[in-house]
Amino acid sequence: MMSITSLRAGCTALSFATAVVAAVSVGPATAQDTCANRGQLDTLYCDANNDLVADVPPANRQRDPSTMIFAYTPVEDPAVYSNIFKPLMDFMGTCTGKRWVYFPVQSNSAQIEAMRSGRLHVAGFSTGPTGFAVNIAGAVPFAAKGSSAGVRGYNLLAIVKADSPFQKLADLKGKKVAHTSPSSNSGNLAPRALFPAEGLTPVTDYQPIMSGGHDRSVLGVNTGDYDMGAVASDVFERMGNRGTVKPENFRVIYKSTIFPTSSFAHAHDLAPALAGKVKQCFYDFKFPAEMVKEFNGDDRFLPITYQKDWAPVREVAEKTNTPYNRAAYEAEAKREAEAAARRAAQPAAAPAPAAPAAVPAPRP
């Protein structure tokens, strides 16, 4: 398993501040002594009640830290969310009586490894990587953003420039098509599962170019680096709302059915009383105006379960033969570190697209 130390080489922002590390210096989880059922979970965990997430370990392995570390998915520039989540961090501190620290991560694998190794207690994971977080890191999803209408979903969009000649997916054969990262649902796995029925088969009809993120794909289409990008609708909408891009400069030539958006999960080994408090505080939190604007009208966290709400995502993973297992996770962590190293070596003024992925990547 790739360690946090090795991941730093590809992404300098992965280092925890010394004070934060000291506050949460906890060793990695240890394997369960006995396990009647494990399912797809890593050997560190057990699922005796068959709910697809790791069981709470015995009392001597439970944690009740004085400082809680929180991280949000690196689906976009992590720096954007440091201020956005400050009201939540302040509220959680008051509600739980503990100090809460927001930690920006630069890759999905770094975020998952941080929870697996005991350095991350609560996190918002992107849709596809949620499966890795559950199986590899012992994450227990409990909430998603939403409103009075219910839990927020999103669509896979295929976007092209408004003045491009492309009208349907089949027009993109042999063209420059951006996927985001191997573990992304809408940015990689869903296109592999859904595009063939529309006359465009990834790898056969084009070589997916891993852009490194939904925002990078959107910007790449905007500048002409890519002919088309497969992106999450909520990210695309947020970039338009912020003024990062002009929506009228794009056309959507494909829109999927709804997928669940990012999950918020706690580490499986938090003391039950603390885990319960964390969940209730999340459900009690009311988004301030700046968060409502940032998250497209969502104003609250609503209860979810991985077993029920992530069923469509697991179905895509099964259809694309991309299991949420250790081997696939380690392969993705290696790719993410290599992509980060490539980006770091590029001129700051004009980042270039990543190299095409030669073979199908094994992860949503």
Image: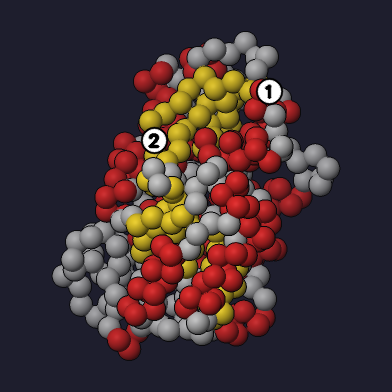
Q: Horizontal and vertical percent for residue 191?
A: 45, 31
Q: Horizontal and vertical percent for residue 64?
A: 43, 84
Q: Horizontal and vertical percent for residue 144?
A: 42, 53
Q: Give the residue at x 32% y 41%.
A: 312
Q: Give the residue at x 60% y 61%.
A: 85
Element assignment for label 1:
helix
Q: Is residue 325 visible?
A: no
Which amino acid type is marked by label 2? Ile
Front residue of 67 and 331? 67
Q: Which residue is mark 2?
A: 258
- The residue sitting at the bottom extreme is 60
Which amino acid type is marked by label 1? Asn
Q: Which is more N-terminal, label 2 or label 1?
A: 1
Q: CA distance from mark 1 to mark 2?
A: 24 Å
Q: Give the residue at x 65% y 27%.
A: 247
Q: Quadrant of residue 21?
A: bottom right
